[in-house]
Image (cartoon, helix red, strand yellow):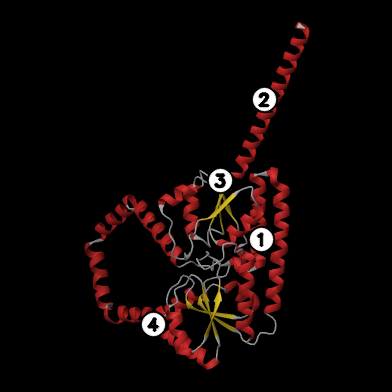
Amino acid sequence: MKLRALLISFIAILVLAACSNDAANNKESDNTDSDNKNLKVYTTVFPLYSMTKEIAGDTMEVESIYPKNVNMHNYEPSQKDILNYAKGDLFIYTNHELDPVAKKIHETIENDTEVLEAFNNEEAFIEDEHHHDHDHDHDATEEDDEHDHDHGHDATKEEDEHDHDHDHDATKEEDEHDHDHGHDATEEEDEHDHDHGHDHHHHGEFDPHVWLDPELATQMAENIKDKLVEMNPDEKETYEKNFESLKADLEELSNSLDEAMKDKKRDTVYISHESIGYLAHKYDFKQVGIHGLNDDEPSQKELTHMIEDIKETKTPYILREQNVSSRLTDMIGKETDVEFLPFHNLEALTDNDPEDSTYQSLMKENIETLKKALQE
C-alpha cells in the first residue's frame, strides 16, 4: 500500500510540473504575440495609413496623425502630439521635400522611433507651377517699378552715400563687418533656417499628392512592406501576401485610369485646389486650381480670368475636394452655372467618409469623377 501511494504521489507531481511548464510556455507565447500586436505605427496622409493597415493586417496598430477634416497644408501638430509619436515604433511619411511638417516631426523623434520615408523617387516630383507662375506674373511689375524708382530717384543719393561711406565710414564698416561675422553668424543662420522652414511648409516647391497616381502609390506600398518585414520578420509571409493583394488592386486602378483618360473631349480640369498635378502630367491635361497648391487664394484678376475661361469654353464641371474651403468655388459656381463633382484628394478623411474607406475605394470614385470631367 505504501509503495502504491508513493507511486501515485510521484505521478501527480510529474503531471503538475508538466502543466506548469505548458502554462509558462503558453504565457510566453501570448506575451510574444502581444508584443508584436502592440507595435504602433503612425503615418501622415490617409493613403499611407490605408496601405500600411492593409499590409500589416492585425499584427500592428496603425494610426494617421491627421484628424478628420484636416487640411495637410495648414495642419500643425502640437508638441504633445509629437511626443506621442515618439512613443510609437514606426513613423511613416511621404518624403522630406513633399511633407515639411513630417520632416519636422522626423527630426524630433528620430532618436526614439523608427522612421520611413516612403517615397524616394525624386525624379517623379512635380513642381508647384502655380507658385512659380504667381511669382513671375505678379512680382515682375513690382520689381520693375522698384528697380526704376531706385535708378530714377536715388542715383544721386546713392552716389553721395557711397562717397560718404568711403570718406568717413570705412573703418566703421570694417568693424561692423567683423562684428557681424564674429557675433551674429549663428543668429543669421538660425533666422535663415527658421524662415526657410516656415516658407517651405506654406509654399512648398513640389506637389505632395504623389499618392493620386496608383503607380507611384505602389512604390510606396512596397517600401512600407519592406520596412514592416525588417521590423517584424516573423510575419514576413503575411506582409508579402498582403502586399501582393494590394499591388493587384493598385494595378487595376492604374488600368482603370488609363482607360478613363482615353478619348478625352476636354483638355482642362477645374478643381478647388491644385492636387492633381501628377495625373495631369501623366495623362496630358491641364489642371486649373481655384486655390493654389498651398491653398493660396487667387488675385481678383486671376479669378476674373477663370470665370471668363469657364464661360467661353462652356466647361460643365468643377471638382470640389473634401477638405478645401468652398467659398470661392461656390462663388465661381454661381457666376458660371457649373456643376460640382466630388473629388477626394485623400490627404485625410472627413466625417462624411465611410468608416471602412480605403485608398482603393476612394480612388475608384475619383476615377469616375475625372472621367466625367474630361469626357462630357
Indicate the position of residue 362 as horizontal and vertical percent values: 60, 69
| Label 2 close to label 3 by CB (< 8 Å) | no
The quarter of the picture where the N terminus appears is top right
Residue occupying the point 46% across, 54% down = 104
Q: Nearer the N terminus, badge 4 or badge 3?
A: 3
Comparing 72 with 58, the one in front is 58
Can you see residue 366? yes
Q: Which residue is mark 1?
A: 219
- Residue beneath the point at 43% across and 87% down: 304
Contact (CB < 8 A) between labels 4 and 3? no
Residue 20: mark = 2
Q: Which residue position is annotated with label 4?
A: 141
3D distance between C-alphas at marks 1 and 3:
22 Å
Tell me which numbered mark, 4 or 1, is placed earlier along the sequence: 4
Name the outermost residue toward the bottom.
312
Position of 240 with respect to 60 (left or right) is: right
Q: Which of the two marks, 4 or 3, is nearer to us in this view? A: 3
Judging by the rendered image, the residue that carries numbered circle 3 is: 89
Question: Can the viewer see residue 119 in this picture?
Answer: no
Name which quarter of the figure residue 7 lies in. Answer: top right
Q: Earlier in the sequence, mark 2 or mark 3?
A: 2
Front one among 127 and 163 = 127
Dot 2 or dot 4: first in sequence order is 2
Q: Amino acid at mark 3?
A: Asp
Packing grade of label 4 (10 A; few <14, some 14-19, many >=20) is few
Residue type of the residue flagged with mark 2: Ser
Marks 2 & 1, CB-CB < 8 Å contact = no
Compared with residue 358, is residue 25 higher up or lower down, i.e. above or below?
above
* Residue at mark 4 to residue at mark 1: CA–CA distance: 43 Å
Tell which of 216 and 1 is nearer to you.
1
